[in-house]
Amino acid sequence: MQGAKNLTQGPITRQLFNLALPIMGTSFIQMAYSLTDMAWVGRLGSEAVAAIGAVGILTWMTNSISLLNKVGSEVSVGQSVGAQDNESAQRYASHNLTIALILSVVWAVLLFSLAHPVIALYKLEAPIAGKAVEYLRIVATAFPFVFLSAAFTGIHNGAGMSKIPFYISGAGLLLNMVLDPLFIFVFDWGTAGAAWATWTAQAIVCLCFVYQLKVKNRLFGGFAFFTRLKGLYTKRIIQLGLPVALLNSFFAVINLLMGRTASTYGGHIGLMTLTAGGQLEAIAWNTSQGFSTALSAFVAQNYAARRNERVISAYHTTLKMTIFFGFLCTLLFVFWGSEIFSLIVPEREAYEAGGIFLRIDGYSMMFMMLEITMQGLFYGTGRTVPPAIISITFNTIRIPLAIGLAALGFGIEGVWWAVSISSILKGITSFVWFRFLRKKILIC
């Protein structure tokens, strides 16, 4: 199949690493946009970090919705490649891009119009809320770039070409890192400058994907970016991507409510700790997500080709790597949490509060890695519902658990323990669920 890589033959570990490392880099780069903004805005003070942190949860929700077409592309295109069906790969690619554009425009208009009432949920002081609304409205106009780039990334991952999204996203991050201090401090645009830097970088990334597929490498022999939607392909994409998008979007909603809870018990320092700490946790999440996505793409092709022995071997290899990485994250967060947090916000009160969050959250790292690995295995076999059920169930528990622990005298630390405990439960449940279904899913 033109431009695609066949993952049904060859050394498993090497193929997983070749897929995973660029995807890890791409995931880290996408997360680093917000982290870079926070790092520079952190020099303006904890209130400014709280403002963009409030919007950060909403951009997280945006990225979660865009997963409908990222995962939809990875699995539908990957399985088409595994089945040597070039026409289906073309049609799925076109349909994913079309759906991504429609969703992005609707979502952008919604958040732009409702910026004030949405930010009001956090109960922030008026000056902080005003900055958050301005930031949100700027980044909302870039959502079409975000959604289309996610779909472009999924198409390349499904075709086994994960290095291309890495290079393109890396270029976008470098541009964002250059523009942030320029717009924030030199042009004196403050938090709005961080938003415009991100907007510009995301637009350039999307244009690079267009150039890559239209000029440099006409993947699958070329395909139309936008097409009239047909029920067969649209239904399959929604079946694959919607559970993933829903569970991640629901996760973002839970974090929005957790942000309100943190603000209630800890003021803007509590909200800042949750959002900035979440960005640091996202380093671990997105890095391991690279292995999960690689596993998903690898499993999609081999599952379609009925190479189940390769599926099981890849799963065991990935699990060993992610658990080891989780152990390293636990050591860093538990013993050096404050030092790590101070790199983002140098205020003493802020990084001491952040250190407590990272220490408590650090205890759940290996279980979080277990959950992420199992997600990749489920997704590759086309079963996206079990991870959605697990995530929605235990993320929902976070709210009453946080309120209950805080009321029992744990205060703001009760909110952090609710995050850690629910992550531990998600990892254990994901592992048990797959072990129960293994014989039904894979018959080697």
Image (tube, rainbow, N blue to C red):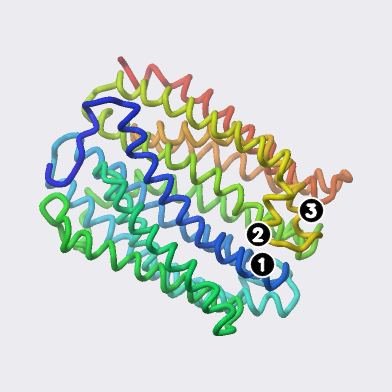
Q: Mark 3 points at which residue?
A: 352
Disc sitting over residue 395 in the figure? none
Question: What is the CA distance from the residue labelled 1 to the residue labelled 2?
Answer: 6 Å
Indicate the amino acid at tag 1: Gly
Confirm or deny contact between disc 3 and disc 1 (CB under 8 A). Answer: no
The image quadrant of residue 134 is bottom right
Q: Name the residue under label 1.
A: 42
Disc sitting over residue 344 in the figure? 2
Specify the quadrant that holds the N terminus. Answer: top left
Among numbered discs 3 and 2, the one appearing first in the sequence:
2
Secondary element type, mark 1: helix
Indicate the amino acid at tag 2: Ile
Query: How crowded is the residue under tag 2: few (<14 C-alpha within 10 Å), some, or many (20+)?
Result: many
The spot of residue 193 in percent (x, y) is: 54, 78
Q: Nearer the viewer, residue 272 or 85?
A: 272
The spot of residue 178 in percent (x, y) is: 48, 70
Confirm or deny contact between disc 1 and disc 2 (CB under 8 A). Answer: yes
